[in-house]
Image (spheres, helix red, strand yellow):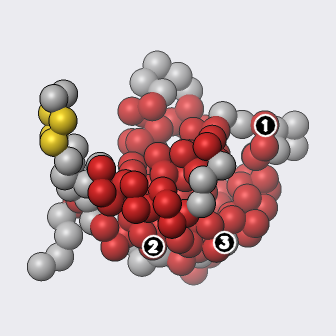
Amino acid sequence: MRPSRQSKSTARLYALQALFQMEAAGQGADSVLREFEDHRFGAVYDEGEMAEGDIELFRKTVGDAVNWQARIDQMTDRALVAKWPIDRIDPTLRALFRAAGAELVEGEAPPKVVINEYVEIAKAFFPEGREARFVNAVLDHMAREARPEAF
């Protein structure tokens, strides 16, 4: 059975959150992956139920983001204005670029799908800002570098 579009979207959101947590708390990938798999995927809390996600996409995205972080960060830096290197941007956006970059470098989804998915995530985190357009522009640049044959 193929994972649904919703479970892939959820996996992408969880991957961004896991990467953010790894950086903010200084945690390693293994402990964060385990925590998310044990406590987020389908967990039920008083506030409601967490969505199920595509666990394979989640693991692959986080793993590839860690393994290819230097390359992804360099691609992101080239897509950003010179005054705004990746270490100066919002940590949520940094995690988003790393997750999306992992899919652009090593993923199977078409670049336009990856860009659209992460722009939608940016809208959820920054509903009143210009970040979604910024994310779209940066990811478009990264996608053209990572997979020029797709354009």
State left or right for residue 6 relative to residue 56. Answer: left
**Quadrant holding the C terminus:** bottom right
Where in the figure is residue 125, as x and y percent of width and height? Answer: 45, 31
Other residues around mark 2 within 10 Å, as few (<14) / some (14–19) / many (≥20): some
Q: Is residue 99 visible?
A: yes
The answer to whether marks 2 and 3 mark residues whose Cβ atoms lie closer than 8 Å is: no
SS at badge 1 = helix
| Residue kind at label 2, given as amino acid type | Lys
State left or right for residue 35 relative to residue 16: left
Sequence-wise, which precedes: disc 1 or disc 3?
3
Camera-nearest residue between 36 and 132: 36
- Residue that mark 3 sits on: 68
Tag 2 or tag 1, which sits nearer the N-term?
A: 2
Amino acid of disc 1: Arg
Q: Mark 3 belongs to which amino acid?
A: Trp
Q: Residues within 10 Å of mark 3 (few under 14, many from 20)?
A: some
Q: Identify whether 126 is placed above or below 39.
A: above
Picture coordinates of residue 35, whole percent (x, y): 39, 55
| Residue 41, picture quadrant | bottom left
Residue ID for mark 2: 60
Up/down of 16 relative to 132, above or below: below
What is the spatial separation of the Cα atoms under label 2 and label 3, in whole angstroms? Answer: 11 Å
Tell me how far mark 1 sits from mark 2, CA to CA.
26 Å
From the viewer's side, name the closer residue of 131 and 29.
29
Residue at figure coordinates x 76%, y 46% from the top left:
86
- Whole-angstrom CA distance, mark 1 to mark 3, is 20 Å
Q: Disc 1 marks which residue?
A: 88
Nearest the eye: 70 or 48: 48
